[in-house]
Image: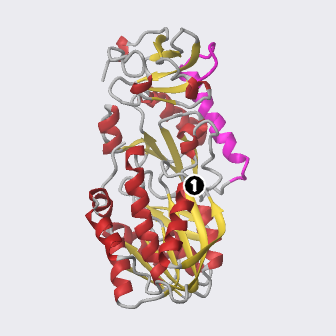
Amino acid sequence: MSSLSQISHSPVPLAAKPSRQFPFLARHPWVHLSSLAQEGAGLAVGQVVDLTSSDGQWVARGLVNPHSRLRVRLYSWDPVQQLDDEFFRRRIDQAIRRRALAGVVPADGAQRIVFSESDGLSGLVVDRYANYLSVQITAGGLDRFREVILDHLQQALRPAGICLRIDEKSASHEGLTKADTWVRGSAPGELILFRQNGLTWGVDLLGGQKTGAYLDQASNHAVAAQYLRGRRVLDICCYLGGFGLVAAAAGAAEVVGVDGSERALAAAEENAHRNGLTQLRFVQADCFDYLREAHARGERYDAVVLDPPRFAGSRHQLDSALRAYQKLNSSAVDLLVPGGILVTNSCSGRVSRSDFLNMLCDVARRRGRSITILESRGAAPDHPISVSCPETDYLKCMICEVGEPNVGGNATGNPPRNEVEAAESDPAATDLRAGGTPEV
């Protein structure tokens, strides 16, 4: 990474290719290399740049990273605004105030404090778990302001400790150094406990996925639980048990949680024990394999929850991701009794809401079952959506009722043999089954 001494105090101009400036005029913050007439390869990481149109008209101001295909991240559309320490302090303060609009989260609760592009801070995510913060940096250019960000979070929120996470994927794509470490205050001696949806949860901020837990689903856990009362529930990709535990606490008769991670299941079992919930059991298995084998055994459930990891990390993986979602949802529908509840989720930003609905429509057609959407939901309020960056509207949560099989139709729920062979011979689908992380 280039030294800070190489950074010019004045913004350096970079021009967009002809007719490629329009998304940035509309305030989309991501400028990929393919949109630039100049590569900026010789600039220092974190150098402030002024994006211009091909004829030299000023468009926006951002930070460059010559190591990344996402070459510039834009932060300001005001030509007099300087991208300095004070700018990022103000943006963090604005994000904190924005969270208060939806109500105050108790001191022992959890919430997302900064949500990257939605808060005008592309490449920065900050989560609070009780009195601890988890900070994730995914932008090489923004890393120049790491100490300013950490110092201001410490001053503004006074946490007992702050951990920094830079995952291997971000490190590889952004020229960063992988990090999982406590950088402010003191590390907790054990799991951090926080309250959410009336339950107590334990989280390992350094050992968990992303920033520790999936706070974006908190309100969906609560709403879905109301539809699962008295039902036998299969919770696929259960991770720490979010959907299943809240459903059990709300009166689900039985919950079977399935996940491929032994560590996640151990944490889910601890969470169940911590809250005195006894009607849950957990199984370590590949989700696709478990669904297929459960169907072969003749199992039926009153409800199935699907909350898989991201299947599409780039637009090139959209088709393979939709095939994977189709296979997963088809297998879930096969296990549902008539009138059963399907809670199906997608956290792939590249998969639009209309894409996801079309996939469900295809599942209904192929399986000969009606699928009625009772609620179409998104992320919790602490994950706001930027209208200028549609990718921030990434989470889809559909709560559906699945009807009876068509009389005389494909009541077995089995797709034609050629569809099965096509899905299982698809290399991309194989990668998704193996849990591989898609390339950006």
Q: Residues within 10 Å of mark 1 (few under 14, many from 20)?
A: some
Query: Which residues make up the magenta segment?
Result: 76-104
Colouring of the image: secondary structure
The x, y position of residue 203, in whole percent, is 45, 61
The x, y position of residue 185, in whole percent, is 45, 43
The residue that label 1 is drawn on is 353
Left/right placement of residue 46 relative to residue 262 reads right
Using the image, determine if residue 395 lies above or below residue 181. Answer: below
Q: Which residue is drawn at 35% across and 90% down?
A: 297
Left/right placement of residue 419 relative to residue 245 reads left
Q: Which amino acid does label 1 sit on?
A: Arg
Q: Does the magenta stretch include residue 370?
A: no
- Secondary structure at numbered mark 1: helix
Looking at the figure, which quarter contains the C terminus? top left
Q: Does the magenta stretch include residue 89?
A: yes
Q: Residue at x 48, y 35 (%)?
A: 150
Residue 209 in view, yes or no: no
- Direction bottom: furthest residue: 298
Using the image, determine if residue 379 lies above or below residue 251. Answer: above
The x, y position of residue 226, in whole percent, is 65, 77
Camera-side residue: 194 or 16? 16
Q: Which residue is drawn at 42% across and 16% down?
A: 37
Using the image, determine if residue 279 lies above or below residue 396. Answer: below
Q: Which residue is drawn at 36% across and 12% down?
A: 5
Looking at the figure, which quarter contains the N terminus? top left
